[in-house]
């Protein structure tokens, strides 16, 4: 029986509609329907396709996650080589490049397009008859891997081109796959909780993700795409800036910050602007890319070796440097985690001297084959400690030493162990001085009890001279004031400051005390949630694992960890002593306060106060602060450079308030 025309039409209409909503959400960040409405469209389409499987086409939005895991990616030969760019680091080099362009173009006039240089992975997308057919990595420039199924999962990449222009149906598009900084951090946090290997930076995590053999896993990773190249042989495109415009019309994600520059001074100006503003972007860039605008002139200029003469990368002052790894030391954290740290030949990177860098864990050292004595590349990220990201094997000295984990804790000589499914080693001895110090430092830290005067050096002294063994001991220190003041070079005034700080900490609210205890997997957010559902330590103690697990946002990992913590007698003793000392183990009654029951999410940068301060103000007035936008949230407070949270809030209809309005709320209400 021939298929009803109406079914075909219905399917076509649904696909078009879904594509349009994907475009609005993932490219324009201006969604017009709710999640639920979107899901309904998708379900209707899925049901129809189930009924008429012969109508399923690879470009249907239901086919974003498709294909079975592959063992090896097939090879793709690029129609035109994917070139790399020559790099310039100084204004002089940039002017030199411009002089060469000028002389090669024998005094024709020319313009440049400046773009941001995204720190991601270059890919090519081939469309035939308007359908995405092949997606590939750059590989060696001539041949790359066919990763079509992985690239199809990126929702800002159209599977089908929305155009009637025949000249634009057979095209090649190139661009960069990348991960936003906050998505990367969130993903790594989740991996850490799950004991999985951490990624080094957003770029490596994009690279690692694109190499995955199972598109289902790729689909769960927050990949993004920007395109910066179009080859459309049948279209009459004259300039690179026209290509960008056309790409935009074809609904590809094109970065908004590219600029047409009339001369090299304007190029340098663009570079200077972004050198200063790069940190504020939600993704990493490592320079700007400068391209001669006219495609005819690009042809005239041609290429040398592997890079074109019509484009170059003007890199930012490097945040990477080469140095020597002198030694590997082990650090013992407050829960006994043993972390290897590189001692480096001091090197100047992006404004500071770096002499230590993280090596994460045993697997990381083995994977990169890092040895003591190696020359290594050290990278400084935006918000994390420096890390060793590469070994320069050619420079490896003959006496470079392989590092192996000892069997004993470097601090207390107890046995160390590595649980089967985890990447870390742990020291088993809870009395290990490093763990003791770590727990006290955590107790005193800013998000916890915030005790001024109780920094690392002071904690070291107090523990080493046996004044304290645990955090409860802090609250009887006042009885030993004279003895403390007698410690070498410790005046009465510093002692008094410390004791005052300790006294003030007794007023900190219950959820901070809960966080300060340092229960594994219970972060600031978790403690906040627990304090609402179990508003006293008594209630929390009497909850069993199942109950905990059923609490909103508390997973099995946290539940298990809480149960294990309370099963230890010395932890209960500690809590009893802290309670006796006057610390808060009960949540304040919040009903009747102006913001009672209201949930806020903060996003972007507030100009009047730090986020932590805003959070405290909200909590003081009875409100709560959540980390992500959901239907339960009442207000999203937006500061400058708000990101994806704003998009989501708009989409699901959470009330959005600007900083002024928020200030009014916390002052006047
Ligand atoms: S144009 C010949 N534009 O930089 C033209 N590349 O070193 C080459 N990249 O492999 C590409 N942002 O991964 C171009 N706006 C941009 C770019 C960009 C990042 C990367 C790309 C390329 C590498 C070249």
Image (spheres, rainbow, N blue to C red):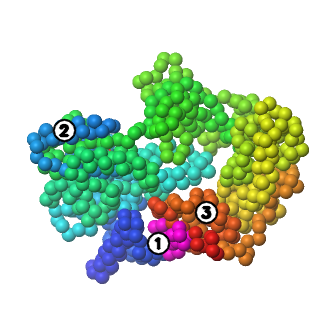
Q: Disc number at residue 614?
A: 3
Secondary structure beneath label 1? helix
Q: For mark 2, what is the residue?
A: 99
Distance between the Cα atoms at labels 1 and 2?
Answer: 50 Å
SS assignment for the magenta stretch, majority: helix
Mark 1 or mark 3, earlier in chain: 3
Query: Left of 400 or right of it: where is 76?
Result: left
Which marked residue is nearer to the observer: mark 1 or mark 3? 3
Q: Which residues are magenta?
A: 646-662
Secondary structure beneath label 3? helix
Distance between the Cα atoms at labels 1 and 3?
Answer: 25 Å
Q: Please name whichever residue, 415 or 287, is drawn nearer the observer in this view of the structure.
A: 287
Does residue 272 appear anywhere in the picture? yes
Q: For mark 1, what is the residue?
A: 651
> Residue drawn at (55%, 22%), measured in percent from left and top?
401
Mark 1 or mark 2, earlier in chain: 2
**621 relative to 67, above or below:** below
Q: Please name whichever residue, 13 or 342, is drawn nearer the observer in this view of the structure.
A: 342
């Amino acid at each position: 029986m021939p298929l009803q025309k109406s079914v075909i039409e219905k399917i076509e209409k649904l696909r078009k509609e879904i594509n349009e909503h994907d475009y609005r959400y993932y490219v324009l960040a201006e969604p017009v329907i709710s999640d639920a409405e979107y899901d309904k469209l998708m379900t209707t389409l899925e049901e129809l396709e189930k009924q008429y499987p012969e109508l399923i086409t690879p470009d249907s939005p239901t086919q974003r996650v498709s294909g079975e895991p592959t063992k090896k990616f097939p090879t793709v030969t690029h129609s035109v080589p994917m070139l790399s760019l020559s790099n310039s680091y100084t204004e002089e080099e940039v002017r030199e490049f411009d002089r060469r362009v000028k002389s090669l173009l024998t005094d024709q006039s020319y313009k440049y397009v400046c773009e941001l240089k995204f720190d991601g992975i270059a890919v090519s997308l081939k469309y035939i008859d308007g359908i995405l057919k092949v997606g590939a990595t750059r590989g060696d420039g001539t041949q790359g891997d066919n990763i079509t199924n992985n690239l199809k999962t990126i929702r800002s990449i159209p599977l089908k081109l929305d155009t009637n222009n025949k000249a634009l149906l057979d095209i090649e598009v190139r661009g960069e796959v990348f991960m936003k900084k906050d998505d990367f951090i969130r993903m790594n946090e989740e991996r850490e909780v799950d004991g999985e290997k951490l990624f080094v930076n957003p770029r490596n995590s994009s690279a690692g993700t694109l190499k995955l053999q199972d598109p289902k896993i790729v689909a769960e990773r927050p990949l993004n795409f920007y395109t910066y190249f179009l080859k459309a042989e049948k279209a009459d495109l004259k300039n690179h800036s026209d290509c960008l415009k056309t790409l935009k019309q074809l609904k590809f994600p094109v970065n908004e910050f590219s600029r047409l520059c009339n001369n090299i001074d304007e190029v340098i100006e663009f570079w200077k602007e972004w050198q200063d503003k790069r940190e504020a972007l939600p993704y990493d860039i490592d320079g700007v890319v400068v391209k001669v605008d006219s495609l005819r002139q690009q042809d005239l200029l041609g290429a040398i070796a592997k890079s074109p003469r019509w484009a170059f990368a003007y890199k930012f002052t490097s945040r990477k440097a080469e140095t020597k790894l002198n030694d590997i030391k082990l650090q013992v954290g407050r829960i006994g985690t043993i972390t290897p740290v590189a001692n480096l030949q001091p090197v100047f990177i992006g404004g500071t001297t770096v002499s230590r860098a993280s090596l994460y864990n045993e697997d990381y050292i083995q994977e990169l084959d890092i040895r003591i004595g190696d020359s290594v590349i050290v990278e400084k990220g935006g918000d994390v400690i420096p890390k060793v990201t590469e070994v320069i094997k050619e420079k490896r000295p003959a006496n470079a030493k392989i590092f192996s984990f000892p069997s004993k804790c470097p601090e207390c000589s107890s046995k160390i162990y590595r649980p089967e499914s985890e990447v870390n080693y742990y020291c088993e001895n809870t009395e290990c001085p490093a763990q003791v110090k770590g727990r006290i430092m955590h107790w005193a830290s800013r998000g916890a009890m915030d005790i001024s005067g109780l920094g690392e050096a002071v904690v070291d002294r107090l523990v080493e001279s046996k004044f304290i063994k645990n955090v409860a001991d802090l609250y009887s220190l006042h009885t030993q004031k004279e003895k403390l003041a007698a410690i070498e070079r410790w005046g009465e005034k510093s002692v008094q400051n410390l004791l005052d700080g300790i006294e003030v900490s007794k007023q900190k609210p219950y959820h901070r005390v809960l966080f300060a205890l340092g229960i594994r997997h219970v972060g600031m957010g978790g403690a906040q949630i627990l304090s609402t559902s179990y508003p006293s330590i008594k209630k929390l103690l009497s909850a069993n694992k199942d109950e905990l697990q059923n609490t909103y946002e508390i997973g099995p990992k946290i539940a298990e960890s809480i149960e294990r913590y309370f099963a230890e007698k010395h932890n209960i003793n500690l809590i009893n002593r802290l309670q006796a000392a006057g610390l808060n183990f009960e949540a304040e009654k919040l009903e009747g306060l102006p913001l009672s029951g209201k949930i806020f999410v903060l996003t972007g940068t507030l100009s009047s106060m730090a986020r932590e301060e805003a959070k405290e103000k909200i909590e003081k007035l009875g409100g709560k602060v959540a980390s992500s936008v959901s239907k339960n949230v009442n207000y999203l407070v937006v500061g400058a450079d708000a990101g994806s949270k704003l998009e989501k809030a708009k989409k699901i209809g959470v009330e959005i308030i600007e900083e002024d309005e928020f200030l009014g709320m916390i002052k006047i209400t």
